[in-house]
Image: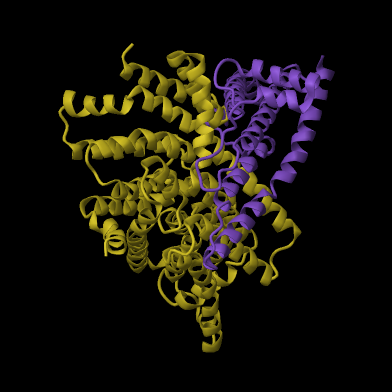
């Protein structure tokens, strides 16, 4: 059997195993060990499975994952973001769609503190969503804003998705994080422009706050600005020692987690139940990620051993005669299609080992591709029928928002994100300028 | 028969639950190590051991805490079809596919034991034979005879150079507990199919 055939067989049996609904790590791990046992006999087979566990252990930046998960739970469970929302509410309420724009601002701040999109989603759905609905905002608008906004979490540093990407692509995490800054802010700006235009044309989607609510004394307004200091404080406590080179990335993430925890304690929001939920769920989610990565590393190692990437590359360039750009665009499209029916974490660890080396073979910049990859992931999370964000939203939103509303709400925002993706593809400098500026002075 | 299955599930569930409840505080162990590490760097006397110690802590955290995460149902499934099935169909399919999970964990455990044996200076052949020889020597001739069986002790390639075997040992225990938990899940599916809710 040719290597291409083996690769295709492995991939399709993995998809089949995933469809049975067994735990993702079990499905991937099983296919990987069976393939390696058949290919290289018993010794090679079991060595490969366990050596991926050792590889995982030695991969130091992965320690940021439990730290950010813990921090995300602390931020969302202890509700210390309430004041932050109040700040935007008071300052932006006077504009058409102002609360929606304020929510995007809230999401940017939360993204700057945490590397996962779940935290932003939870805060958006529990704090911003009920307030916006009460003020007569269109429910589709609101649900779209929260989903789109929370997805910024994985592009604005610190970002866990880019940490995982860095592991697979063997690229420096610091440069990848810097590369995400401008595209992330650009995307937030595009969202804001879209909301502003849409609400100007259809004012009933995002009504201005009534005079009574707008009439907040200036002193109170200034006091609320103080709420904005919390994320800035956490962001700087985390990023300054890292950028200055005093601490490593991982140590910074631990400092950030501790800072968030202390902030919750000082504000008196850390009680027994919140503490229990945070600690317990951090273990659950960390284990889920780690075991999937463990199995996927083993799967990836079998693929590496087969030289499958080389085979696929030659299939595209030599047999089909496609140019590198055509292949890149095809890859992004297929990525989006896969993303509609694959679970997000599964996609992250299965698709990346296949695609990333191929992009490298074609001669593209892997830092730049990291940003494209992350934006594509974000879009995939949000597209029906299988978007992780959609289900989270369904779980957190009040019952008057139906699954139909949620599906409908994301369409314009997905279009904005595709636009951002195209812009970054055409103008790589948007992603590459900042890391170049910092690292090649 | 069902009584035995139920007993097994109760014991394993209870044991892994308690272990998991302890391991979940491991997040604070990792934080403390990393905080100490940053402090020592800022003071200008970076410590050598923190990096690897934090890695060891994380391995223990997710390996030994793993069975509890299975109990909590944190391990995602792709529920494209799964979500639509009846409880009985789910139990049927799970009872079959969980065997794949058990197989994977079994291979992983065997690989772990081989690697553990390697870290104690055993380079080829079956790890089982090595460990039985080791135990035999220990119980007949005490620690000295057991020391004879050991070969070159593996260390990591870092300035701190800790021995590797303790962490490999912890990993083997973690995978073993995962295996026990996966078997408990298998028994639970069987009980569901025979009509006794576990």
Q: Which chain is purple?
A: B
Residue A249 located left or right of residue A201: right
Q: Which sits in the foreground, A415 or A175?
A: A175
Q: Residue furthest top?
A: A1
The image shows residue A105, relative to residue B1, as above or below, that is below
Is residue A17 visible to the viewer in this orientation of the structure? no
Which percent across, then down, holds residue A419?
Answer: 28, 53
Which percent across, then down, holds residue A322?
Answer: 17, 32
- Hue of chain A? yellow
| Quadrant location of the N terminus of chain A in the rendered image | top left
Which percent across, then down, holds residue A214?
Answer: 50, 81
At 49% across and 75% down in the image, what residue appears?
A: A209
The image shows residue B29, relative to residue B141, as above or below, that is below
Q: Quadrant of residue B130?
A: top right
The image shows residue A142, relative to residue A35, as above or below, that is below
Q: Quadrant of residue A82?
A: bottom right
Residue B67 located left or right of residue A338: right
At 54% across and 24% down in the image, what residue appears?
A: A20
Which percent across, then down, holds residue A112?
Answer: 46, 63
* Total numbered labels: 0
Q: Which sits in the foreground, A77 or A95?
A: A77
| Quadrant location of the C terminus of chain A in the rendered image | bottom left
Is residue A283 visible to the viewer in this orientation of the structure? yes
Q: Which sits in the foreground, B62 or A57?
A: A57
Colouring of the image: by chain
């Amino acid at each position: 059997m040719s290597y291409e055939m083996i690769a295709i067989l492995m991939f399709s049996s993995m998809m089949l195993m995933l469809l049975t609904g067994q735990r993702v790590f079990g499905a991937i791990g099983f296919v990987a060990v069976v393939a390696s046992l058949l290919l290289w006999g018993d010794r090679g087979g079991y060595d490969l499975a366990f050596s991926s566990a050792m590889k995982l252990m030695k991969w130091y930046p992965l320690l940021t994952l439990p730290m950010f998960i813990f921090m995300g739970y602390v931020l969302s469970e202890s509700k210390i973001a309430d004041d932050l929302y109040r700040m935007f509410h008071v300052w932006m309420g006077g504009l058409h769609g102002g609360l929606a724009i304020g929510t995007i601002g809230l999401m940017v701040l939360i993204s700057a503190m945490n590397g996962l999109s779940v935290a932003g989603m939870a805060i958006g759905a529990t704090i911003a969503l009920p307030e916006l609905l009460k003020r007569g905002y269109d429910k589709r608008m609101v649900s779209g804003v929260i989903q789109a906004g929370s997805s910024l979490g994985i592009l604005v540093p610190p970002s866990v998705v880019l940490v995982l990407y860095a592991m697979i692509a063997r690229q420096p995490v610091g440069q990848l994080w810097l590369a995400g800054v401008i595209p992330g802010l650009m995307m937030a700006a595009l969202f804001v422009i879209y909301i502003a235009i849409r609400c100007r044309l259809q004012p009933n989607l995002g009504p201005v706050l009534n005079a009574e609510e707008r009439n907040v004394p200036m002193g109170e307004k200034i006091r609320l600005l103080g709420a904005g200091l919390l994320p800035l404080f956490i962001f700087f406590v985390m990023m300054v020692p890292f950028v200055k080179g005093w601490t490593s990335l991982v140590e910074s993430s631990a400092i950030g987690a501790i800072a968030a925890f202390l902030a919750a304690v000082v504000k008196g929001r850390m009680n027994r139940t919140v503490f229990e939920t945070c600690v317990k769920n951090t273990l659950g989610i960390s284990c889920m990620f780690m075991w999937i990565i463990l199995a996927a590393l083993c799967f990836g190692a079998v693929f590496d051993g087969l030289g499958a990437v080389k085979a696929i590359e030659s299939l595209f360039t030599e047999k089909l005669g496609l140019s590198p750009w055509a292949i890149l665009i095809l890859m992004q499209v297929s990525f989006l299609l896969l993303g509609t029916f694959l679970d997000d974490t599964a996609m992250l660890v299965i698709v990346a080992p296949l695609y990333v080396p191929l992009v490298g073979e074609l001669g593209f910049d892997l830092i730049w591709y990291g940003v494209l990859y992350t934006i594509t992931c974000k879009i995939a999370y949000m597209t029906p029928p299988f978007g992780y964000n959609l289900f989270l939203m369904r779980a957190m939103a009040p019952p008057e928002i139906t699954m139909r509303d949620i599906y409908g709400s994301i369409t314009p925002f997905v279009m904005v994100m595709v636009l951002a993706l195209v812009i970054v593809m055409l103008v790589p400098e948007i992603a590459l300028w900042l890391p170049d500026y910092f690292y090649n002075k | 028969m069902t009584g035995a299955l139920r007993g097994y599930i109760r014991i394993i569930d209870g044991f892994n639950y308690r272990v998991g409840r302890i391991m979940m505080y491991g997040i604070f162990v990792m934080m403390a190590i990393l905080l100490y590490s940053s402090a020592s760097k800022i003071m200008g006397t970076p410590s050598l051991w923190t990096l690897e110690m934090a890695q060891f802590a994380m391995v223990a955290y997710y390996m030994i805490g793993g069975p509890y995460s299975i109990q909590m149902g944190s391990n995602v499934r792709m529920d494209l079809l799964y979500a639509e099935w009846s409880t009985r169909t789910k139990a049927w399919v799970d009872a079959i596919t969980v065997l794949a999970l058990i197989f994977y964990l079994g291979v992983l455990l065997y690989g772990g034991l081989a690697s553990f044996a390697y870290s104690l200076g055993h380079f080829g052949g079956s790890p089982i034979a090595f460990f039985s020889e080791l135990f035999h020597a220990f119980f007949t001739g005490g620690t000295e005879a057991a020391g004879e069986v050991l070969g070159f002790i593996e260390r990591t390639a870092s300035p701190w150079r800790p021995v590797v075997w303790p962490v490999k040992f912890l990993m083997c225990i973690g995978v073993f507990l995962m295996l026990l938990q996966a078997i408990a899940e298998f028994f639970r599916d069987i009980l569901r199919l025979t009509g006794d809710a576990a």
